Amino acid sequence: MKTKQLVFAAVFAALIAVGAQIRVPIGPVPFTLQAPMVLLCGMMLGKKYGLISVIVYIAVGLIGVPVFAGSGGLGSLISPSFGFVLGFIPAVVVTAMGGKENLSKMILFSILGMIVIFIFGVLYFSFIMHNVVGTPMGLSEILMVAVVPFLIKDFVLAVLTVLFARTLTKRGLVLQ
C-alpha cells in the first residue's frame, strides 16, 4: 500500500465522520451527509482505497468513537438505521466502478451506489425492527419512514457529488 493513498483513505474516513455530524433528525433515520462523502470517497480513491476508508470509518465507530450519526460503539449494531452504514461498504465499490472519465457513467454509478445504501438500510431496518425492537414493519411502512423522505435529496446529492469530484479531478487532484 502506498503511503499517499493510505493518508487519503484516512482523510476520507474523517470526512465521512464529519458528514455524519452534519445531521437533521427526521424520524428513526437522520438526514446526514455521510452518503455523499462515501460516494465521493469511491470516486476519488477508487475501489481498494475507498473500501479501506469506509471499513476504517465503520471500525472506528464500532470501537466506540462517536463517528456515526449520533453515536458510536457496538450498540450501534442494534440501531435500525445501521444498515445504511453497512451499505457504505458495497456502495463505495459500486460508485468507484463509474470511473472518472465519463460523466454519465459516473452519475449512473453514483445513483446505483445510493440505491445499494437504501437496499442495505431497508433490509437491516426490517430485521432490527422485527427481531430486536419487536415491532415488525411492512415494506411500505419502512419505505415511508426510511427511504421516501430522503430519495430526492440523496439523488440530487449523488449528482452534485459527481460534479464536485469532476471539478476536483479537472483541477489536478488525483488521489488514485
Image (tube, helix red, strand yellow):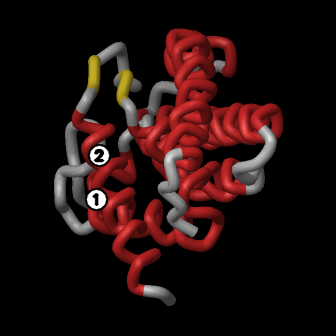
Spatial CA distance of label 2 from label 1 is 6 Å
- Give the structural element (helix, strand or loop) at label 2: loop
Check contact, mark 2 vs mark 1: CB within 8 A: yes
Quick one: which residue is furthest to the bottom in this view?
Answer: 1
What's the residue type where badge 1 is placed?
Gly
Q: Say which label, 2 or 1, has the lower sequence index.
A: 1
Q: Is residue 160 left or right of residue 102?
A: left
Which quarter shows the C terminus?
A: bottom right
Residue 8 falls in image quadrant: bottom left
For the point 51% across and 65% down, the residue is: 175
Residue lying farthest to the left in this orientation: 65
Q: Which residue is mark 1?
A: 61
- Which residue in the protein does label 2 denote? 68
User: Residue 6, image x and y in percent?
Assistant: 41, 77
Where's residue 116, x and y in %?
68, 41
Q: Position of residue 31 (x, y in %)?
A: 37, 22
